[in-house]
């Protein structure tokens, strides 16, 4: 048995993959190297990564500026605890994030994953109301088809059906769910779109701490897109009924939808905002929860004000250093033009799929292209067909979609869209 076969055989027997079975595991493809927007498999095949490693590697792979930031920081320190200590990489990253975030964002809490940033946001909201003498405000309201992570608090605000967490329904906190809007643009808007959420707020506002949702584009709960007017009206309702608004920008932040943060398209400011994924350009796991001065002051209202959370790897110096380098690289690049060009090319090259009998819908927003099939796709078969055409995507449910690195070339993107059209035509 060769060395490659040995480690692959061991891995197949002992190592779980996301949402996978150990008894009958789906095929996985061993990656030897990543460069630019391509992955090189151990067998020498090369594929264009149309997923940006679950939407995080916005600059592609093996980026000199990000490599240098890691190497430079490594010479000083790779990690120190953030309890009782601090360091320049965390402070400098925090400063930059608050400069580009919605204007009212004034404080932030670092964590090590997007799910945990949602947990922190929920704790902020609950502690805010407890400190203000309103402990009965302890439930959250969200919209269906949402996804906010796999930890227990985050799971409680994911769609009970499409959020992949039905197995835990009996032990999750009982949150409230409203219908997700169906209008994709303000031109399609009518007030019936907000009726379900408005009704739940009117009935339950006395026990609600916050509304939490993904702005403009919902992610792994269904890859749905909705009108900015919905988000604008949610902000109005939260103000009217004294609720906090949490926006989960983990998937949509850092330019993915065409603006730095998706909530900008609704011209609103949240009370709390979660970020992650592309924060480090896909190099390391890092997330943050930002909040307004009002939320911070509210948490301190009863004189205690200790936010009850503290991850071991909070504000890891390596992660903070590479995140700052990634932000500077993004801001120095023509990212708006790149995302707009990707959006236009996706629209042009995927539009023929609308006429296919197997396709139920086509959705495009910024550097996101989603084909919804009429029935669930055979993920193993579809991935094999895509890899045969030199493309890596990760379909799920009825969805075949791409969220490529912003640096993908038009020719590379055309290979991705051609492969998507091909597998849809044969489905």
Image: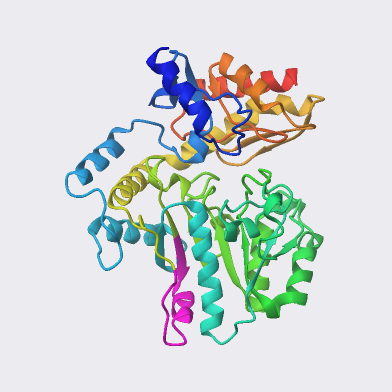
Q: Residue at x 61, y 23 (%)?
A: 383
Seen at 66% across and 61% down, the residue is: 172
Residue at horizontal 48 percent and vertical 22 percent from the top? 9
Q: Image quadrant for the N terminus?
A: top left
Say left or right for 209 vs 331: right
Residue 242: x percent and y percent? Answer: 63, 79
Q: Quadrant of residue 96?
A: bottom left
Asked if the stretch drawn in magenta spans residue 306, the answer is yes
Q: In terms of image quadrants, where is residue 157?
A: bottom right
Q: Is residue 138 above or below residue 251?
A: below
Residue 245, x across and y down, in percent: 59, 68
Rendered residue at 62%/30% (across/down) = 23
> Seen from this angle, which residue lies furthest left?
75
As drawn, 384 above or below 52: above
* Quarter placement of the C terminus: top right
Q: Magenta stretch: residue 209 in it?
A: no
Of residue 284 and residue 63, the one placed in the foreground of this image is 284
The colour mode here is rainbow
| Tally of numbered tags | 0
Q: Is residue 369 above or below residue 168?
A: above
Residue 400 in view? yes
Near-viewer residue (160 or 359) = 160
Span of residues in magenta: 289-308
| Horizontal relation, residue 360 to residue 236: left or right | right
> Residue 155: percent from the left, percent from the top?
62, 56
Asked whether residue 270 is in view, the answer is no
């Amino acid at each position: 048995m060769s060395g490659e076969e040995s480690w692959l055989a061991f891995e197949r027997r002992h190592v779980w993959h996301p949402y996978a079975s150990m008894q009958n595991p789906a095929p996985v493809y061993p990656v030897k190297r990543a460069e630019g927007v391509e992955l090189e498999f151990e067998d020498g095949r090369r594929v264009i990564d149309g997923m940006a490693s679950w939407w995080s590697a916005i600059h592609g792979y093996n980026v000199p500026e990000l490599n240098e930031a890691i190497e430079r920081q490594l010479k000083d320190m790779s990690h120190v605890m953030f309890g009782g200590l601090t360091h320049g990489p965390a402070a400098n990253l925090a400063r930059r994030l608050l400069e580009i975030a919605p204007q009212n964002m004034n404080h932030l809490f670092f964590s090590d994953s997007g799910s945990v940033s949602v947990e922190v946001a929920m704790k902020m909201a609950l502690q805010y109301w407890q400190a203000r003498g309103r402990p009965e405000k302890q439930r959250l309201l969200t919209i269906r088809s949402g996804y906010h992570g796999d930890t227990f608090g985050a799971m409680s605000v994911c769609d009970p059906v499409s959020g992949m967490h039905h197995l835990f329904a009996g032990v999750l906190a009982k949150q409230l769910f409203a219908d997700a809007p169906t209008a994709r643009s303000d031109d399609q808007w009518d007030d019936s779109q907000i009726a379900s959420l408005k009704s739940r707020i009117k009935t339950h506002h006395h026990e609600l701490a916050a509304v939490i949702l993904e702005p403009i584009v919902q992610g792994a709960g269904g890859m749905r897109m909705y009108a900015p007017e919905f988000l604008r009206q949610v902000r109005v309702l939260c103000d009217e009924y004294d609720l906090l608004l949490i926006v989960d920008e983990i998937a949509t932040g850092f330019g993915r939808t065409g603006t730095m943060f998706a909530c900008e398209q609704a011209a609103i400011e949240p009370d709390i905002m979660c970020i992650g994924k592309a924060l480090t350009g896909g190099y390391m796991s890092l997330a943050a929860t930002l909040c307004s001065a009002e939320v911070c002051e509210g948490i301190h209202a009863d004189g205690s004000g200790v936010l009850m959370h503290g991850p071991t790897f909070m504000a890891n110096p390596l992660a903070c250093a590479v995140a700052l380098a990634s932000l500077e690289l993004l801001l120095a690049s023509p990212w708006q033009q790149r995302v707009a060009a990707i959006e236009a090319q996706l629209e042009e090259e995927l539009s023929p799929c609308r006429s296919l009998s197997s396709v139920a819908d086509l959705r495009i927003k910024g550097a996101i292209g989603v084909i919804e099939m009429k029935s669930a796709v055979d993920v193993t078969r579809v991935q094999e067909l895509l890899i045969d055409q030199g493309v890596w995507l990760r379909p799920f449910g009825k969805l075949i979609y791409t969220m490529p690195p912003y640096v993908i070339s038009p020719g590379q993107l055309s290979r991705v869209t051609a492969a998507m059209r091909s597998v849809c035509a044969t489905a």
